[in-house]
Amino acid sequence: MARKVISKREFLKKSASGLGLIACSICGHSLLANSKTSRFLPNESPQTNEIDQWTVKAKYFVNTPKGIKCQICPNECKMLLNEESDCRTRINIDNELYCIAYGNPCAVHIDPIEKKPLYHYYPGSKAFSIATAGCNLACLNCQNWEISQQSPRKTKNYDLPPRKVVQECIDNSCKSIAYTYSDPIAFYEYTFDTAKLAREKGIKNVIVSAGYIYEKPLRDWCQYIDAANIDLKSFSNEIYEMLNAGKLEPVLNTLKILKEENVWLEITNLIIPNWTDDIEMIKEMCGWLAENGFNNTPLHFSRFHPQYKLASLPATPVSILVKAREIAIAEGLNYVYIGNVPGIDAVNTYCPNCNKLIIERKGYNILNFQIKNNKCNFCNAEIQGVWD
């Protein structure tokens, strides 16, 4: 039976009623509809653990008496023959560990870099953004759960190997490639190889991740990663376990390593009612960031909206977000923002020295920019970021 390859336009029409992801959660400038280099993969996915062109040997694993143990993240999944990892992207095939998330993204868009969010990294530039299915966490509030909690063999995917990603980025005049939407840790090998090729072409590489990764693969990644937004989901190990199926300490280690490796870093903290809105915990988190040298690292407090397994909760009160921002500033953090609240002034950047408005934003657009040679135009104080 012949396998049908569908166009991007056909796919969007068919998926609009099924996956709210493209219309709601990801919502960027979709592309590739007219691309000559990319196509959708066949509707049918392999039902056996065959090694195809979208399957590559995993980089970090060890054979143990209890099966293959993945060594990319603290989950340390152990897989017997034909078993898959928690992230759904790694499978034991013939007692070798393979990744099935390679060159087969299910989401491809052009986004403003501010959407990641990265407010201090080439403002106003475009990011060619990709994701495969799969994630090594299981957040109850995940906005992209339709792909993050799914296997790459069960989503409709593009045929987009690393060299094609780089070419599409160039063809669409994007400054960077962003590995985003689900979590690039799940498609680590794809990200690594694409980022390496992108670096050769002068393209910047951005990861948007929960940062739940071990030191060795992270430091290897940092050879080619230029910027990152890490989702620091809470400052409680208990909440991490119950809300995200993870642990806090590995994420804190990730923040420290990214700083050591000179990767431009911004941090997002989603404030969820009854889960991560405790003021004392927020103060403790901000204190830790200040004490560990993250004073000039932009921190984004993001508003929660009901979805997935927390659909019964209310949206975060704006007053809580404002209070969190006040606490962060009082603890010594210089660049603190509020996201997912249209029209709020806290999306703007103010000089921490003279308090003048130096970047005015509306949505993802830059209305006013008062930084030159990395310095405030009003008082000449240095403004941390990657601007030119």
Image (cartoon, grey):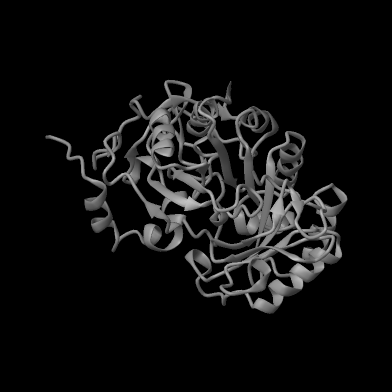
Residue 273 visible from this viewpoint: yes
Q: Residue at x 62, y 59 (%)?
A: 243
- Is residue 211 something one can see in this rendering? no
Which quadrant of the rendered structure holds the N terminus?
Answer: top left
Depicted 61 relative to depicted 340: above or below:
above
Q: Position of residue 5 (x, y in %)?
A: 20, 40
Query: Residue 340 placed where, x, y %?
Result: 57, 68
Q: Nearer the viewer, residue 220 or 380?
A: 380
Relative to 292, 18 lies left or right: left
Q: How many marks?
A: 0
x 47%, y 21%: residue = 95
State whether residue 332 is above or below residue 59: below
Residue found farthest to the left: 1
In the foreground, 327 or 84: 327
Position of residue 101 measured from the top left corner of the image (x, y, whole percent): 43, 35
Viewer-closest of 29 and 5: 29
Q: Quadrant of residue 14?
A: bottom left
Quarter-wise, where is residue 45 in the image?
A: top left
Residue 119 as seen in the image, left or right of residue 248: left
**Is residue 116 left or right of 356 when viewed as pictured?**
left
Q: Quadrant of the C terminus?
A: top right
> What residue appears at the point 13 percent right and 35 percent down from the top-left corner?
2
Q: Is residue 219 above or below residue 336?
A: above
Residue at the spot 52% in from the left edge and 58% down from the top edge = 142
